[in-house]
Image (cartoon, rainbow, N blue to C red):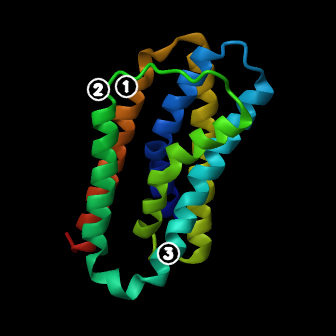
Amino acid sequence: MGNIILRSTLLGLGLSMDAGAVAIANGMKYRDMSKRSMLFISFLFGFFQGGMPLLGYWIGRAILAQIQEFLPWLALLILGFLGGNMLYGSFQSDTKAMKKLTPFFCILQAIATSIDALSIGITIVHYTLIQAIICAAIIMGVTMIISFLGIYLGKRFGLRFKGIAEGIGGLILIGIGIEIFLKGRGI
């Protein structure tokens, strides 16, 4: 169980970096944001980031027999692609800000930053349902914390840390993909 908690925490850290980057941008743009709004946005980001792996888990379980042999490769490809994408994004400058921060727009941000977490569910299909729920809860909690801190940092320091956070998240996802691949291949 300790390995699942550690892996889930690392997945949460890796997956939450894009949500954290968006949270930083929100904090920069809306410096007068209330703590209630900060908590609401953090909850939304965490809820979707934790819910998507569960959805992917159930989809993956439905097709497990067909993909069992390819899971290590699939995990390496999915996590490598997502991590590489985040790493690439860490070198891009994206300072576009939204016009108004509405609850609907926050939900769209939460969905957009959590779509990649859907594929994570496929990489945990060997977990029991309880283990998958624990994994999703940890990812949700980590994302909520990172998002809240992101908004706070955005309000305080600006976009200086966006690229660094996203780059670290990408490296974490790539590392987890390699670990799953090596274990799945018996290495």
What's the mark number on residue 163?
Answer: 1
Q: CA distance from mark 2 to mark 3?
A: 33 Å
User: Residue 172: image x %, image y %?
Assistant: 36, 45
**Circles 1, 2 touching at the beta carbon (< 8 Å):** yes
Near mark 2 (Cα within 10 A), the count class, few <14, some 14-19 or many ≥20, is: few
What's the mark number on residue 91?
Answer: 2
Q: Is residue 170 above or below residue 35?
A: below
In front of the other: 104 or 187: 104
Q: Is residue 187 above or below residue 46?
A: below
Q: Residue at x 27, y 73 (%)?
A: 184
What amino acid is at disc 1? Gly
**Circles 2, 3 touching at the beta carbon (< 8 Å):** no
Rendering quarter of residue 95: top left
What amino acid is at disc 2? Phe
Q: Earlier in the sequence, mark 2 or mark 3?
A: 3
What's the mark number on residue 59?
Answer: 3
